[in-house]
């Protein structure tokens, strides 16, 4: 199989690492070669973070190039816009319809762009969910990222059962049930 | 497995018995993963990289396989023991893992470890992915024992924090080498060192000769019109973008296999050298009279990529979108971070801070803009002292040094001793958040817990400062802004060294439980913006100018509430 390129973008602290580990885990589970690249350290402190996941028969470099992402998973609207040029023309953007103001906006140096998703929908295939609201309804706002993952899962090469198995093996044991519920919710959108 | 996880696994399989390290992105996860094998080996956080390296040297001299790991700038701290350990050589195998940070994702400079290793005359291996990281780690110990030298495993951020598939092997218990007193080898006074220097030169010559046959130095001949000499992660970019090109992949980047390189160069029409950061391979190859293209077309700065190769070789396929112009999102202090509280006080008092290395370096940027300098670990205190000696004590009345607890234990304490000894009049603020925050919460000598999880007596920073002769040492809750302001005002005016220890645990520590959240009362809000000044990411302005607090982000530290003069923010149960 040709290498598939997935990207997860968001704001440091939103749980991109956990999501990428599930993506890595499922590729191994399905018998693919896989490489992931993450960001740790200073950049994680509320900054813009990006994680690359590549899987296929044989993967060389761990980074996704501009214009090559099959699926771009964005945990925040502005971050979707920041990395949209990585998405293939026929790729899909899965986005959490949520706004977190960067410090440059809070301090008035910059303005948060209006109508980001509406504009992106004109040029790309966009699937959106307000995962934060949905997660609150489930009783734990932290699992919003798994809801987004559930929505994205429909555009990857694995079965729902595979996903649930890998989630069970990856997340802390106390949170298995709520994470599975969150995934099902996203998957059913 | 992460590259770092694979290194830890390799060390375990290689029979390592002692490991010491100081956390530093991107090397930290090596020790954090090694600790899972604590039934088979001993591992620790040392206060700094020099100590860690000396621990590894001692363990090696005693006859066991040992290692020290650090980031590139930590390697500078470790340079002193390393340069001489190159002379003594080893008994049990010894490896140092040094992680470079091309692109400076989390560092203050972009130095190239290979240059220091060359200067110190120690061999360097460089893996390209997680599988190699594990295998090269094992090989490092074999080479160390064979050539009687410490061996460096060089990684980069991209390798350390990328994951790839790794096959596991069993641990091989290596028999301890017997210890024999050998003054000529292990006591480096001039008479002995002169002789050992000859040994070092001969060893590197021997190894350079053998390197021509190392399996990890591998020529892959394909289309011979273009050949690349490369190593590490950049090798993967070559394979990705130009799989048809011939490649000489070097696993051992110091010493270089001269004959192998000469042979490769003679077989390809055009030779490129594709190495991140400094032209270490390139300059040597060119010095042998071999024609090659390197830094003429490939940058000296930042991280390499496939895109760089495509650009240089005009391989861009269909046009790609240009990045959108969007507001930057730089890293910031977390909601509820005690550093923000301290900086909000210093900012109000218009105080300059000589800064240090840690999350609190972020106090340099708007809206806090308190930190004026950041050089290296421990430098806050000594640079403040230097200013005082240059300009006099009046000059630094509106200055303080700020340093974290872990950084203070690393190399801050000796700078503070210097202030006492040389009669400085500066104010040092130790921002004690009970952990090494930025690298992801590692323990240190003042936290009371070891890497292996044992509870131990914590070094008491207050008493430590007292014991070196500082009379004015004060502890204050980082969120008690009134008290803090009072103390800072008093101490910066004092003609003596003062230490102010601001205490409040890192907001991300798992042991930290938040019971409160802040909630705006918009009817009382006067839209003055006082609460927004410290730049807490949980706070934003609503369209009508009143304040909104994102309840999923707020950690209930109460700083905004304390800054509000109109009681328009209340604390509620989380």
Image (cartoon, coloured by chain):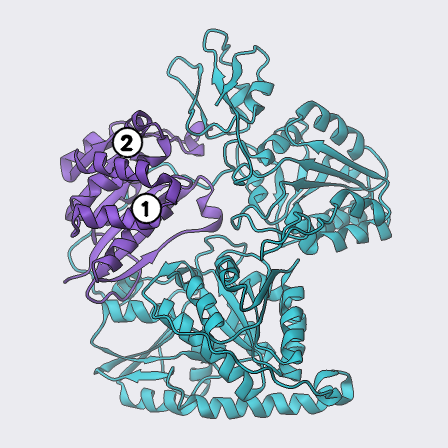
Chain colours: A purple, B cyan
Q: Which residue is mark 1?
A: A19
Q: Is residue A87 visible?
A: no
Query: Which one is in front, B304 or B165?
Result: B165
Distance from Cα at disc 1 to Cα at disc 2:
14 Å
**Residue A131, label in figure:** 2
Q: Quadrant of the N terminus of chain B?
A: bottom left
Residue at 37% x, 60% y: name it. B162
Question: Which quadrant of the view contains residue B395?
Answer: top right
> x, y percentage for residue B510?
52, 40
Secondary structure beneath disc 2? helix
Question: Which quadrant of the view contains residue B132?
Answer: bottom left
> x, y percentage for residue B76?
61, 65
> x, y percentage for residue B161?
41, 58
Secondary structure beneath disc 1? helix
Residue at 49% x, 10% y: name it. B525
- B343, above or below B263, in the image: above
Query: Which one is in front, B225 or B508?
Result: B508
Given the current orientation, which residue lies at the most extreme top position?
Answer: B523
- B302, above or below B439, in the image: below
Residue count near mark 2 (Cα–Cα under 10 Å), binned few <14, some 14–19, many ≥20: many
Q: Are marks 1 and 2 on the same chain?
A: yes
- B574, above or below A187, in the image: above
Mark 1, chain letter? A
Residue at 45% x, 71% y: name it. B10
Of the image marks 1 and 2, the number of the one nearer the N terminus: 1
In the displayed structure image, the side of residue B540 where residue B390 appears, left or right: right
């Amino acid at each position: 199989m040709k290498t598939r390129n997935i990207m997860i973008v968001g704001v440091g602290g939103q749980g991109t690492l956990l999501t990428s580990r599930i993506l890595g885990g499922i590729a191994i589970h399905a018998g693919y070669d896989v490489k992931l690249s993450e960001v740790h350290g200073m950049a994680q402190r509320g900054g813009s973070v990006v994680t690359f996941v590549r899987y296929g028969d044989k993967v060389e470099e761990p980074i996704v190039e501009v214009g090559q992402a099959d699926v771009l998973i964005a945990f925040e609207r502005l971050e979707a816009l920041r990395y949209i040029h990585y998405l293939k023309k026929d790729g899909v953007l899965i986005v959490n319809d949520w706004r977190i103001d960067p410090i440059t906006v809070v301090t008035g140096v910059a303005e948060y762009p209006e109508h980001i998703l509406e504009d992106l929908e004109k040029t790309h295939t966009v699937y959106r969910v307000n995962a934060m609201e949905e997660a609150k309804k489930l009783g734990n706002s932290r699992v919003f990222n798994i809801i987004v993952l559930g929505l994205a899962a429909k555009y990857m090469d694995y079965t729902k059962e595979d996903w649930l198995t890998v989630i069970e093996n990856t997340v802390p044991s106390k949170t298995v049930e709520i994470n599975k519920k969150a995934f099902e919710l996203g998957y059913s959108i | 497995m992460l590259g770092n996880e694979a290194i830890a696994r390799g060390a375990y399989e290689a029979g390592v018995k002692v490991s010491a390290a100081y956390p530093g992105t991107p090397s930290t996860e090596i020790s954090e993963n090694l600790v899972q094998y604590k039934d088979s080996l001993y591992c620790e956080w040392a206060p700094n990289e020099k100590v860690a390296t000396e621990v590894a040297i001692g363990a090696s001299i005693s006859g066991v396989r040992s290692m020290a790991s650090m980031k590139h700038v930590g390697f500078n701290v470790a340079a002193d023991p390393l340069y001489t350990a190159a002379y003594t050589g080893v008994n049990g195998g010894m490896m140092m893992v040094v992680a470079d940070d091309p692109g400076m994702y989390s560092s203050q400079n972009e130095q190239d470890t290979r240059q220091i290793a060359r200067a110190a005359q120690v061999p360097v291996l460089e893996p390209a992915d997680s599988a190699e990281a594990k295998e090269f780690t094992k090989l490092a110990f074999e080479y160390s024992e064979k050539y009687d030298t410490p061996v460096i495993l060089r990684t980069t951020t991209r390798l350390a924090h990328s994951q790839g598939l790794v096959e596991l092997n069993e641990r091989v218990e290596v028999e301890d080498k017997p210890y024999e007193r050998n003054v000529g080898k292990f006591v480096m006074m001039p008479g002995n060192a002169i002789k050992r220097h000859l040994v070092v030169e001969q060893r590197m010559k021997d190894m350079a000769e053998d390197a021509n046959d190392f399996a990890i130095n591998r020529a892959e001949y394909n289309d011979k019109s273009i050949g690349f000499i490369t190593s590490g992660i950049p090798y993967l970019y070559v394979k990705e973008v130009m799989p048809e090109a011939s490649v000489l992949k070097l696993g051992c980047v110091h010493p270089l296999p001269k004959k192998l390189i000469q042979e490769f160069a003679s077989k390809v029409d055009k030779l490129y050298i594709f190495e991140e950061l400094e032209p270490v391979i390139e300059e040597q190859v060119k010095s042998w009279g071999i024609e090659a293209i390197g830094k003429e077309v490939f940058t000296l700065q930042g991280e390499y990529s496939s895109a760089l190769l495509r650009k240089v070789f005009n391989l861009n396929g269909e046009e790609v979108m240009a990045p959108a112009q969007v507001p930057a999102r730089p890293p910031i202090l977390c909601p509820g971070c005690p550093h923000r509280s301290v900086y909000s006080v210093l900012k109000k008092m218009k105080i300059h801070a000589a800064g240090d290395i840690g999350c609190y370096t972020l106090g340099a940027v708007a809206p806090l803009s308190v930190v004026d300098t950041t050089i290296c670990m421990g430098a806050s205190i000594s640079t403040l002292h230097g200013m005082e000696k240059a300009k006099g004590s009046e000059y630094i009345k509106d200055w303080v040094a700020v340093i974290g607890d872990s950084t203070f234990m690393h190399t801050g304490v000796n700078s503070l001793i210097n202030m006492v000894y040389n009669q400085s009049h500066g104010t040092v603020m130790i921002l004690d958040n009970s952990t090494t925050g930025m690298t992801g919460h590692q323990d240190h000598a003042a936290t009371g817990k070891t890497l292996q999880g044992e509870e131990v007596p914590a070094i008491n920073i207050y008493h430590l400062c007292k014991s070196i002769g500082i009379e004015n040492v004060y502890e204050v809750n980082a969120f008690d802004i009134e008290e803090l302001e009072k103390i800072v005002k008093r101490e910066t005016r004092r003609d003596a060294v003062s230490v102010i220890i601001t205490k409040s645990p890192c907001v991300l520590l798992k042991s930290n439980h938040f019971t409160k959240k802040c909630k705006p009362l918009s009817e009382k809000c006067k839209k003055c913006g006082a609460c927004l000044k410290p730049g807490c990411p949980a706070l934003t302005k609503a369209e009508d100018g009143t304040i909104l607090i994102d309840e999923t982000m707020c950690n209930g530290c109460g700083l905004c509430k304390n800054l509000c003069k109109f009681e328009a923010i209340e604390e509620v149960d989380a």
